[in-house]
Amino acid sequence: MNMKKVFLLTLAVVMIVSLFAGCGQQTNTGDVETLTMATNAAFPPYEFYENETIVGIDAEIAGKIAEKLGMKLEIIDTEFGSIVAGVQTGKYDMGMAGMTVTEERKASVDFTSSYATGIQSIIVTEDSVIATLDDLAGKKIGVQQDTTGHIYAADEFGDEMVIPFNKGADAVAALKTGKVDCVIIDNEPAKSFVQANQGLKILDSDYAVEDYAICIAKENTELLEKVNKALEELIADGSVKAIVDKYISAE
Ligand code: ARG
């Protein structure tokens, strides 16, 4: 092999190697990692549609978390009851849906610190004979499928008294047409459903007080730590409160 051939061969090898190196570099710096969040966007003011976009308290907090993590947030709307299993099996990175921390869910997924409180409320028609929790015995109770409201109502009043709906708004529609006698749902969505419909009220009695948190797969401890740190910073610097105030006072 003469010097010229050696030179050309070396040049070709260098070019090919740098071509591949270049590609590698581009995937490292060009692509931002995606953070997928499963939710059920029928739960105002935590998550709901504004035109085609999912907005709300959870969507905004998650956006800020993703920003802190240098990731791109992707929100996936699914049935509430499929979120925990989807997170557990790694289909979604996290679940954020005004989701109450419960012992049962904790057996399947881990939770971050809590960022909000929920209270189970009872919605009735303005002329209802139901005045307190005790009056619910023997009444038809509408709930959103697989929520804590569903679980409590079934435990306390019997499965046969409970009618689950895909969305809280569908349970409220059934209340208006008399298909159910009341709806048990979290207080903030309850307020927004009552505001959006005429002839409904929320009973004074607080039913159950709960903590909302983000769920993450048990084996994904690295992400849990990162998300938790970001969330705690956002709570400490007042960002979470500002987001909550924006949606809850603007209602
Ligand atoms: N807090 C209740 C629960 O965890 C209801 C949450 C419903 N959330 C929703 N996005 N639909 O069961």
Image (spheres, rainbow, N blue to C red):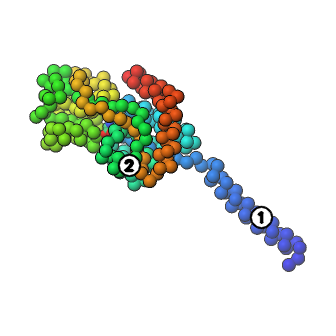
Quarter where residue 41 is shown: top left
State which quadrant residue 54 falls in.
Answer: top left
Specify whether 74 is left or right of 174. right
Locate the N terminus by quadrant: bottom right
Q: Quadrant of the C terminus?
A: top left
Horizontal and vertical percent for residue 69? 55, 42
Q: Nearer the viewer, mark 1 or mark 2?
A: 2
Identified at 23% across, 22% down, the residue is 204
Circle 2 residue: 109
Report which residue position mark 1 lands on: 14
Q: Is mark 1 within 8 Å of ligand 1?
A: no
Which quadrant does ligand 1 occupy? Answer: top left
Label 2 SS = strand
Q: Residues within 10 Å of mark 2 (few under 14, many from 20)?
A: many
Three-letter amino acid code of the residue under disc 2: Val
Judged from this view, the residue extending furthest toward the right is 3
Q: Residue furthest bottom?
A: 1
Task: Give me the residue at 16% from left, 23% from top.
Answer: 131
Q: Nearer the viewer, residue 109 or 51?
A: 109
| Viewer-nearest residue: 236 or 186 | 236
Q: Is residue 222 above or below residue 189?
A: below
- For disc 1, the neighbor class at 10 Å (few under 14, some 14 to 19, many from 20) is few
Looking at this view, is 49 or 240 the one in front? Answer: 240
The alpha-carbon separation of the residues under discs 1 and 2 comes to: 49 Å
Q: In the picture provided, is 51 more to the left or to the right than 160?
A: right
- Circle 1 SS class: helix
Please give the name of the residue rendered at 32% of the width and 42% of the height, measured from the top-left corner.
102
Residue 52: tell me if it is visible.
no
Q: Which of disc 2 and disc 1 is earlier in sequence?
A: 1
Q: Amino acid at mark 1?
A: Val
